[in-house]
Image (cartoon, grey):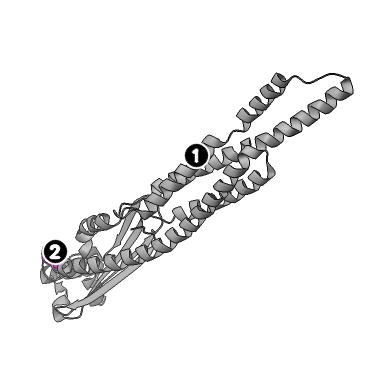
């Protein structure tokens, strides 16, 4: 299934009085890159979340934002009375040394390191968050991938339209190419006969044949047409594949090869009609290259 690299998914739930929510956003990138935004106490889950992302996403910048909101009384931090008492003792010693008394700011004391401690152990908090967040991550990823697949189908259909145009123009060029040699032969004979008639000489057939052979070799585009047609067929096969493998990089490389062949055809053929068809082919390939940049 063809997928784009952009997408969005979200999921949320309420579990044991705690509200969990996850948002997953994906943007274009040549490689895989993940950013996981978690509260500090839950950052131990970041490797697990990134590993789960890598199982589903191969290319793109993926940003995960996870939140846990505990509205129960168990969310209250515990006051470390021993640490608080030690801070108060030190403040009193400072006051005695200065010989003056200043009011103690209790709110400020609570912000000092070690005074407020999370409810429960770090492992217990992580385990609780894991049970709430990881299933939500799976749901959000399903929504993300579904959106990527929808956009991928639109991109694939647009690319197929351009491939169809290229195929039609290649057929036109293939029909016109043989006539180019015949037309050149006619022009060459007419020009030489006119010149020789003025000079009172005659033309030798081998000389004309040799000149035509050189011209035909220099303007021969049969191999380029064959390779470009083969690239178009391979492009269609990759778009039709159902194995779910990412093909964005392969298609990008293939589009570059298609443009290379089209440029060679344009440089070797002097015919105006072929030149016009080649311009359309190159324009279609450029649009394909733009669309391929969005595919996983």
* Whether residue 112 is visible: no
Quick one: quadrant of the N terminus?
A: bottom left
Q: Is residue 276 above or below residue 226?
A: below
What number of labels is visible?
2
Magenta extent: 122-127
**Residue 9 located left or right of residue 261:** left
Q: Are marks 1 and 2 in contact (CB under 8 Å)?
A: no
Instruction: Quickly name the residue at label 2.
Output: 122
Q: Earlier in the sequence, mark 1 or mark 2?
A: 2
SS category of the residue bearing label 2: helix
Mark-to-mark CA distance, 1 and 2: 65 Å
**Residue 58 located left or right of residue 130:** right
Specify few, some or many for label 2: CA neighbours under 10 Å numbering under 14, 14-19, or 20 or more. few
Q: In the image, which is nearer the foreground, mark 1 or mark 2? A: 1
Q: Is residue 296 above or below residue 137?
A: above
Instruction: Quickly name the residue at label 1.
Output: 226
**Residue 155, horizontal then vertical, whole percent:** 44, 60
Q: Which of 172 and 165 is in front in this view?
A: 172
**Residue 208 located left or right of residue 279:** right
**Residue 145, horizontal then vertical, whole percent:** 31, 63
Quick one: quadrant of the C terminus?
A: bottom left
**Residue 6, horizontal then vertical, whole percent:** 39, 62
The residue that appears at 24% across and 63% down in the rendered structure is 40
The residue that appears at 20% across and 65% down in the rendered structure is 134
**Residue 226, horizontal then vertical, whole percent:** 50, 39
Residue 124 lies in the magenta stretch: yes
* Whether residue 88 is visible: yes
Q: In this view, does 263 lie above or below 291?
A: above
SS category of the residue bearing label 1: helix
Q: What secondary structure predominates along the stretch shown in magenta?
A: helix
Q: Nearer the viewer, residue 20 or 182?
A: 182
Specify few, some or many for label 1: CA neighbours under 10 Å numbering under 14, 14-19, or 20 or more. few
């Amino acid at each position: 299934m063809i997928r784009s690299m952009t997408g969005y998914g979200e999921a949320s739930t309420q579990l044991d009085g705690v509200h969990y929510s996850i948002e997953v956003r994906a943007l274009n990138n040549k490689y895989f890159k993940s950013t996981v935004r978690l509260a500090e106490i839950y950052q131990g889950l970041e490797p697990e979340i990134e590993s789960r992302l890598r199982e589903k996403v191969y290319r793109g910048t993926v940003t995960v934002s996870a939140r846990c909101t505990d509205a129960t009384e168990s969310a209250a931090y515990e006051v470390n009375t021993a640490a608080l008492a030690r801070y108060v003792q030190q403040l009193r010693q400072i006051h005695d040394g200065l010989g003056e008394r200043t009011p103690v700011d209790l709110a400020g004391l609570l912000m000092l390191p070690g005074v407020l401690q999370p409810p429960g152990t770090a492992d217990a908090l992580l385990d609780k968050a894991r049970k709430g967040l990881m299933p939500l991550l799976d749901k959000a990823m399903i929504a993300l991938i579904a959106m990527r697949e929808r956009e991928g189908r639109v991109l694939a259909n647009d690319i197929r339209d351009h491939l169809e145009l290229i195929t039609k123009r290649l057929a036109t060029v293939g029909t016109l190419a043989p006539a180019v040699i015949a037309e050149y032969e006619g022009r060459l004979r007419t020009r030489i006969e006119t010149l020789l008639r003025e000079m009172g000489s005659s033309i030798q057939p081998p000389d004309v044949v040799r000149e035509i052979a050189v011209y035909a070799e220099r303007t021969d585009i049969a191999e380029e047409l064959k390779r470009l047609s083969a690239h178009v067929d391979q492009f269609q096969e990759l778009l039709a594949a159902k194995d779910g493998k990412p093909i964005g990089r392969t298609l990008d490389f293939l589009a570059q090869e298609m443009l290379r062949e089209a440029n060679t055809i344009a440089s070797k053929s002097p015919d105006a009609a072929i030149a016009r068809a080649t311009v359309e082919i190159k324009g279609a390939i450029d649009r394909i290259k733009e669309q391929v940049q969005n595919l996983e």
